[in-house]
Structure formats: C-alpha cells, structure tokens
Image (cartoon, rainbow, N blue to C red):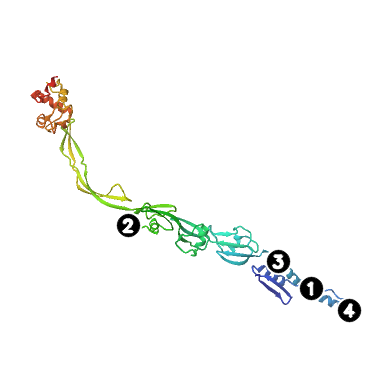
Amino acid sequence: MSNYETYETYDRGVRADVYTDGPTEVYEDTYRAAYEAPEPVFPRQAVTVAPGRADRRRRADRTASTASTMRRLVPQALVVAFLAGGTTAFVAKDKAIELSVDGKPRTLHTFADDVTELLAQQGVEVGEHDVVAPGRDADLASGDEVAVRYGRPVRLTIDGQRREVWTTARTVDGALEQLGVRAEGAYLSTSRSQPIGRAGLALDVRTERTVTIMADGRARTIRTNAATVGEAVQEAGIGLHGEDTTSVPPANFPRDGQTITVLRVTGTREIREEAIPFAVERTEDPTLFKGTEVVERAGRPGLRRVTYALRTVNGVKEKPRRVDEELVREPRSQLVKVGTKPMPTSVQGADQLNWHGLATCESGGRPGAVDPSGTYGGLYQFDTHTWHSLGGSGRPQDASAEEQTFRAKKLYVRRGSSPWPHCGTRLHG
C-alpha cells in the first residue's frame, strides 16, 4: 500500500500530503524551501491628505489588507504546486512487484529499472545454477512477477551409474520429475517428500527392470529393482547351494532385459604325481675325441604331487584345474663330458680297406646299433672290453662314427679281420 504523510504550517495555512514509501528527502526539502521563503514585499503607496480624507484613507486600508492577504497566499500556492508536480513524478517511477525467492513470495515497491537492479536492492544473490524468471536483463513494470529458484546439487546414482546434477526443485519428488527419472516401481534411498536443502543431497535410484533367470531347465522372468544379480535370483525364488553360482557374477548389477543362468556345480579333488624333467650339464673334455660324449653321471627326474579340482557344471565336466602342488623329490642333473680332441683319420696299414662295406654288414651302417643281447654295439659291433682296450670311453654306440671307424682300424692292425669272422671278408671286397 502507498503511505502518505501530511505536512502542515499553521501560521501560513499550508497543508500537503506526501508519498513516503521511498526516499522522501527531496519532497521534504522542497516543502521546507517553500515554507522558509521570505514573504514578498509590496511597496506602500503614499497617501496625500486632502479633502475627502476619510474616503481616501478607507481606500488605502483596503489596499493594504489586500496586499497582506496576497503575501500569505502566494507562498502557499507555490508549495502546493511544487509538491503536486514532485508527487506525480515520484508515483510514476514507483513499481509494485511480486518477488518470489525459492518459493517464498512477497510484494514490494521499487524504483529499480530491471531485474538485476531489483535483486541487488533486495540483497538476493544468484549463482550460475540458479534460475531467474524473467531474465536478469528484463525491464520491470508495475505488476510484474519475478521468481528466483536456487540450484541444488544432487549426487545421483541411477542403476549403478554415478553423476552430479543440479536441480531447482525443493523436494526429491520434484527433482525426479525435473530430471526426467522414471520412478514408478523404483527403489529410492530416501523418501520422495524429503526436502532438498541448498547443500543438496545424495540420491540412489534403482529403476524397475525385466530380468530372465534360467535355472534347472526352467525360465523365470521377473520385474525387479534389486541391487545385485544375487538379490534378483533370490527374488525369483531360486536357491544357490554349495558351489552353485551364476553366469553373471552375483555381485554385478542386473541390467534390463538380461538373461542370467544359474550354474549347478559339483566338484571333487584329485591328486596326481608328476615327473619333473632333469637338466643336462655338458662339460668339454680335451682327452676325448671330437664328437664323443660320455655320461659321467646319469640324470634322475624329480617328483611332485599336484592337486586338481574337478568340476561338473550343469552335468558337463570341465577341464581339471590345478589348485595346489607339493615337491616330493628334486630332479638331479645329468653330467656329460664332450670331447674336443681332434679325431685322427688315418691308421697306417688300414686306410685303404672297405670300412663302409664292413659297417653295412655288421650293423646296417647304424652308429648306435646294439645287438639283441646288448653285448655288442656300434658300426662294427664292439664289446665294451674291446672298446676300452682301444682307448674308447663309455659305450661304443655312443661315440661318433668317425671315432668308431678309427678304433676299428686300430683293432684291425692288432688282430686283422678275425674280430669280424662273418663280415671281415668285406674289408677286401
């Protein structure tokens, strides 16, 4: 409502009503200036005394009375005219505005030209997430409505997906509607009527989804807002026992339209003993001819005990899975001496003989050949005693073909072809 105050001078008879809802200093000063203005001075006319003096004096008194009255009325007229013009301008700039701040309306009068100026006058601060309608640059006219809605941060998790959003709604229900979140049948971490303060809140929403669960040869389709696959399986009335599990990890979030298979699992354990291969360590020996290897120490495989898990899933056996192992015996390396001594190729008196024919007859030309009794070996079927007497090491069948031929030549120089009674004639053939 408009408020007016009355200014009045009793000695001069001046009275003025002034609008005071706003700065009134200008009008008070205007009134005061008019009130304190000096009275106008009217010069008196000289009166000449002559015949008919009484009449002339009466006329002079009437003139003086009229001047006195004018002195009183002129200031009053000036003040009233000045105040009337100022009040008209004052009322023209005043606007009645309905301002609603975060849902709390109030009516006020202002001289602000636009919304930004109005909010500054009223001490209303707005941020980048706040909404002002009409816009902050909009001009104001009397009767306008201005609304300010504060933004509120919401830490929203929808079906496991986290994000931060802003809303001007003051309740959870209003925020869901404003954000376009389908809440029918959904799980909400807080009540829909929960107010949202300026600091915001955290809100977890799980919408209703359709999930199909395959178990024991049957399909069950349910509508659920469960947080995990395990919860959805329970809601479908399906129990998991022992090692039973699901095709989707039980802790995962169930998605709309997803099919989940229940896996019935039976399992046993089996222990097996497995050999550990031994390593072969070779050492050069300058006393042995090149191509000759002698086993100094035979290797021995190690042994370990391995535990396997055997599973059957929905009646189908899976590949065994190693779950544990225990070392029973360490493997022992095999030590081998490798000859580096150059092999002589010539033995005087035996070089021109047919050694290839003899080897073909005795062993079929195979350096590693061994007779059925295990007594004789190599190209020329040496026995171990004869082989060692000729300077050989180990077994003859383990030596190179060159070394075997060299030692056969040495044997021929000693004993001729007698060591080969059946095939010796081939030497000269």
414 with respect to 94 (left or right): left
**2 or 3: mark nearer the eye:** 2
Q: How far apart in space, not on screen, are marks 4 and 1 (Cα)?
A: 23 Å
Q: Residue at x 83, y 75 (%)?
A: 63
Q: Earlier in the sequence, mark 2 or mark 3?
A: 3
- Disc 3 marks which residue? 88
Rendered view: 104 above or below 379: below
Q: How far apart in space, not on screen, are marks 2 and 1 (Cα)?
A: 115 Å
Provide residue 216's location: percent of width, then percent of height. 36, 53
**2 or 1: mark nearer the eye:** 2
Q: How far apart in space, not on screen, are marks 1 and 3 (Cα)?
A: 27 Å
**4 or 1: mark nearer the eye:** 1
**1 or 3: mark nearer the eye:** 3
- Give SS at disc 4: helix
- Give SS at disc 3: helix
Q: Earlier in the sequence, mark 2 or mark 1?
A: 1
Q: Closest to the observer: 148 or 405?
A: 405
Q: How far apart in space, not on screen, are marks 2 and 3 (Cα)?
A: 90 Å
Q: Amino acid at mark 2?
A: His
